[in-house]
Structures are given as C-alpha cells and as structure tokens.
Amino acid sequence: MPAARAVDAADPALSYVDAHEVRFRERLLELIRQPSVSPTGEGVRDCAVRLARMFDMIGCETTEIVETKGNPVVYGEIPGAGTKTLLVYLMYDTQPYDDIALWHYSPLAGTIDELDLPAGRVKALFGRGAMNSKGPLVIFLNALESLLETRGQLPLSVKLVAEGEEELGSKHLPDFVKGNRDRLLGADGSLFPYLIQNASGKAQMWLGCKGIVYVELEVSGKRWGRGPTEFDIHGSYKSIVDSPAWRLVDALSTMTRTNGNEILIPDLVRKVAPPNQEDEDLLAKLATTFDPNEAKQMWKLTAYNLPDGDVLSLLRKYMFTSSLNIDGMWSGYVGEGSKTVLPHKATAKVDVRLVPNQDPRDVIPILRKHLDAHGFPDISITPLMDGYYPSKTSLREPVNQALLGTYREVGREPEILPLIAGSAPFYWFTEFLKAPVAAGGMGHGGRMHAPDEYIVYEGNPRLAGMGDATKFFIRFLKRFGGG
C-alpha cells in the first residue's frame, strides 16, 4: 500500500472517504443535475430544497431555508466538541448554460471523461457548477460527514451559509447577515472551501478579493434631445442627424485611455491603498514561482498589457490596481446580414473592480459627476448589483495559519495570493462579522462561466481528485479545531 494510503487507513475519517466514493459522487451528480441558474431563476428554489436535505443527511442539527427578497439562503449548524467556531461560505447558484452548442458534454449530466492537463491525464467531471461552486460545496459536505460518521462529533462547531445569488452579486446576502448577526457573531474564522490547484498542479491559497460595482450606461435620443428619439431610422440620415451610439463611445472614451488600461477619473482611484509590507513580501515570493503563461494557455490569451518578463509588476497590477471594464455593448441592428439604421439608443454594461480602501458606495456618484462634468448629463446609470467591498485577511490569522499548515501536511507549499482579481462577498465575514476569511483547498477545476466547466474527479500524483480534496478539508477541520 502506498505511504499516503497507509496514513489514510490509520484515520477512520480518511478511510471513510475511500469507502464511500460512489455515494459521494452521486451526491455531486444530484446537485449538478438540478439546475440553479440565478440570472434566470431556473431551478434555484428546487436546488435550495435539495441542498437543505443534504445538510440534514450529513448531520446538521439545525437546517433552515432562510427567505430573502431574492433567492433563499440555506443555513446549517453543527455543534462541535471544541471551543472554536468556523463559518463556512458556500454558493449553490450557477451561471447559465445558454451556450449549449459549444459544450462537448451535457451541462446537466455530470459526465466523467479523460482530460489532458499540463499536470498530466486525469478523469474530469464536466457540468455547469462543477467548479463554480457545487463541486467544492459537496466535497466540503463530504468531509463533514466523514468526520461525523467516524468520530460522532466535529472537533469544532460549524455554521454553513450557502447563498443562491452569488452570480448576481450576492444582492441579498447582506440582509441575511444583518438579520442573523447574533447567531453568526463570535466565529473564530471563516472558510471559503475551493479547489485551488492550477492546471500544472501548483497549490494556492487566497487572502482576499477585489470588490466590484456593475452598472449599465445608456444613451437615449429622447433623453439626450438629439438623434432619433422613438425608434431607429434609416442610416443615411447620419450625415445630418446625431448618433446616440457614437455619443456613448465618446462618453466611454473620457473614462480611460490606452485600451482602457488607465482610468482617467481621479476621484475613482484617489483612495486606492498600495500593497502593505506583508503584501509586498508575498508578491516578491510569488513572483519567483508564478508562471504567467499558465493563464494564457487556459484562457487562450496571446499577450498581457505589460511587457513580458516583469512578473512582479504584472502581479502587483493584477491584484492591486482598480480596473474599469466594458462587459458588453449594443445598439441598433446586430442580427445577420445588413440593415442600415441610425440607432435611437445605445447601451453598455460596465464593471469597476475595487481594491482596498475603495468603497462601492462611492462609485456611481463618482461616475455621475464625471459624466456631468464632461457634458453627458443625459446618460443614465443603472446599478445591476449592489456591489462587493474589497476584502483582505492577513496570513498571520490563525485560520490562514491552519490552512497553510494543512497544505504542508499533505506535502505542498502553496503560492499565496494577497488578493484575487475576482470578487466575492468576503467583506461581510471579515468586517461585519469580524471572522477572518481563509480560501483554499486541494483539487482543480476550470472553465467557470464557460462551456465544458469541470473539476478533476480522479487525479494523479500532481493533481488531487475528489477523494483527496475531501481529505484535505478533513485535515483542515481537525487542525483548526485543535483535534
């Protein structure tokens, strides 16, 4: 028996994982086959009911589907033997799978097939939500069950918070947290269980995330008082009639320069905090191991907007620079063939990513002030989500030290990212509930929000499969709980 298996056999909770592989897989397949598409609402409430049933099955003493003004939060509590309490943030909603023609596997089937990755050949499980984030959710539940069934009690108390609106910007999670503050307060730390090995097998842990504000900008001929006001007109009139579409382009061009790489709104970036000394130390260490080409390969990129070779500058800009991104633009005729029109309105969806010290509540007033000052008072700004605050936790916090120790226990020295450029509602745990957040876990997945989303189901010596990812969380819970 390999050395790792010998160690697993000595711990009943770890060997329980191997003995229940089929049932654990079926649990994940059940959740993937149940749609929960928050942007459309498809299957979300049915998924919440299924998830609550799973909470009961693994041993939650308290399970509740908590209603909000949007999608419900599924909440569960498991009292433990130790003195510590861990809040666990989970999400059960997914992005749509409307690009189904681009999928090689049914997005709701949970198909297992071989996949070649830089770390070698693995068996992957494909499906919408496999990685983001039903796979990590189920794997963590499997870890809890393994401990409860073999020890009778967890080494610490656990409170599970699974929301159904993360893909919508966690619009009503703040209401849940505020409304349940008394029973959530007092936790010693929070965990976002995820599968953070890259395709080459490198392990990572994240100390924080950027915030985000997402808005829609619209130019209307009627509101502007120029151009077509009621409907699109013949394109030949452009020589004598103004264009709302070009007005939107003109307005956007005042906000940034150089392909959007430099924000030209001083008030928007005035409060940006530079990396502190811990951040700089972590960035310098990360620059010695981080391979920029891995992301290029995954996302089919050809180049970054910085010169090649300066990895430290790339990392610093990626994590600690605010950005203004055009997510989509449309106006007039966008169907097949030609239809010459002068559009009566034009729209753009824009997101602003926020770094420490930036406040999402400031963004829309700043955008409004900027547009007014540049002669665009008619352009409307419609918020499409409440927005996330940026969030960051020190590596010195006990919950992060426990996570780091768990990586080392399984023979990995993780890359530590001070921030990820993505956004999550960690602020409500770190600041409002004063429960520092750790984010990590072994295992790998990819193509989130894209066709053929997957997680590694059966791994190899470099990449953890579903079983080893489960065992990682068992080890973490024991380490953080002190037993």
Image (cartoon, rainbow, N blue to C red):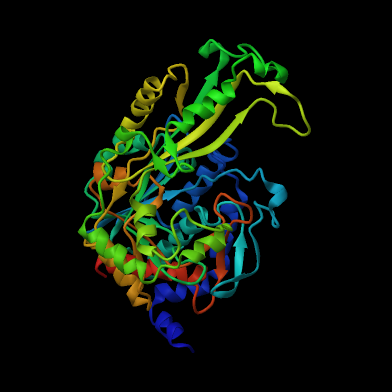
The one of 336 and 52 positioned closer to us in this rendering = 336
Residue 208: x percent and y percent?
33, 53
For residue 326, above or below residue 446 = above
Residue 100: x percent and y percent?
69, 47
Residue under the point 56% across and 58% down: 302
Location of the C terminus by quadrant is bottom left
Q: Which of the 4 image quarters holds residue 427? A: top left
Residue under the point 71% across and 20% down: 235
Residue 371: x percent and y percent?
41, 24
- In this rendering, the count of numbered labels is 0
Residue 403: x percent and y percent?
31, 66
Answer yes or no: is residue 32 visible: yes
For residue 261, above or below residue 464 = above
Residue under the point 35% across and 32% down: 363
The one of 434 and 383 positioned closer to us in this rendering = 383
Relative to 137, 393 lies left or right: left
